[in-house]
Image (tube, grey):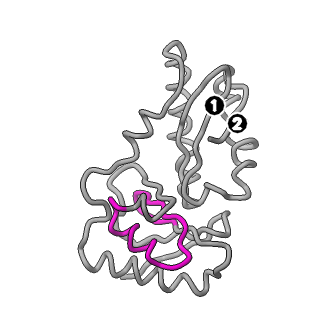
């Protein structure tokens, strides 16, 4: 099994591509070992000293490390855990854990703005999420109130030094162009 790794804009996060499906749909973001109990893979990765975050996408795994450790020391252990997991045949996620259902429940917008929200979501899904996934992360719609779009950055994007620029210069400008009601984009 050959696992590719790619740098992300966040120096604390590497993207690992196992060449096999990770999740059938959606994404999962674990920020602590206690959150990763539903995922044997994520739980094993948190067993490596220095791993501070695990993000699972459809075809990749992003791992965030503590600043005190260098990737040259951590990367072989991460590759070993991912390879061992796939060789074992264990599921990536046990049961029906899925972040998409939780994401839909966490949305905050007025029912009067449903049409605007649908347009914003479509733009995020078709134009933003694929680009952000290439960098080992994800972006999720959280709300729309009084012209302000709230978005949640995940995976490599969470805590990335360039995420503010991505939100302001990229996503905000695009949404303002297509949806005149959008005045600002804020991270949550």
Percent x, y of residue 110: 53, 17
Vertically, is 94 above or below 97?
Answer: below
Instruction: State left or right for residue 49 relative to residue 58.
Output: right
Q: Nearer the viewer, residue 117 or 77?
A: 77
Q: Look at the picture and state if 81 lies above or below 143.
A: below
Which mark, by number, is residue 120? none
Q: What span is in magenta?
A: 37-62
Side of 128 relative to 164 (left or right)? left
State the CA–CA distance, disc 2 to disc 1: 9 Å
Using the rendered view, name the quadrant where residue 56 is placed.
bottom left
Nearest to viewer (mark 2 / mark 1): 1
Give the quarter of the figure containing the N terminus: bottom left
Residue 181 place in picture, x, y as percent: 67, 20
Instruction: Assign the C terminus to one quadrant of the image.
Output: top right
Estimate the x, y position of residue 58 in percent, counting from the top left. Answer: 40, 57
SS label for mark 1: strand
Residue assigned mark 1? 149
Nearer to us in this view, 166 or 78:
78
| Residue sitting nearer the eye, 165 or 96 | 96
**2 or 1: tag closer to the N-terminus:** 1
Q: What is the crowding at mark 1: few (fewer than 14 residues within 10 Å), some, or many (at least 20)? A: many
> Which quadrant holds residue 120?
top right
Q: Residue furthest front?
A: 34
Residue identifier under label 2: 172
Quick check: marks 2 and 1 in contact, CB under 8 Å? yes
Residue density around tag 2, few if under 14, some if 14–19, many if 20 or more, within 10 Å: some
Q: Residue at x 40, y 40 (%)?
A: 102
Which residue sits at x=56%, y=30%?
143
> Of all residues shown, which one is farthest toward the top?
112
Check disc 2 and report its element: helix, strand or loop.
helix
């Amino acid at each position: 099994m050959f696992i590719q790794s790619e740098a992300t804009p966040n120096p604390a996060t590497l993207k690992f591509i196992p060449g096999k499906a990770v999740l059938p749909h959606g994404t999962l973001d674990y920020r602590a070992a206690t959150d990763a109990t539903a995922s044997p893979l994520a739980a094993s990765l948190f067993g490596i000293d220095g791993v501070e975050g695990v993000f699972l996408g459809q075809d990749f795994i992003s791992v965030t490390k503590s600043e005190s450790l260098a990737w040259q020391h951590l990367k072989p252990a991460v590759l070993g855990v991912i390879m061992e997991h796939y060789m074992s045949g264990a599921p990536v996620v046990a049961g029906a854990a899925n972040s998409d259902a939780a994401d839909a429940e966490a949305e905050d917008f007025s029912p009067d703005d449903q049409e605007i929200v649908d347009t914003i979501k479509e733009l995020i899904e078709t134009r933003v999420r694929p680009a952000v996934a290439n960098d080992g992360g994800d972006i999720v719609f959280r709300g729309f109130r009084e012209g302000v779009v709230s978005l949640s950055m995940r995976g490599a994007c969470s805590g990335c030094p360039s995420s503010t620029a991505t939100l302001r210069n990229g996503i905000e400008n695009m949404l303002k162009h297509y949806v005149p009601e959008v005045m600002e984009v804020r991270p949550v």
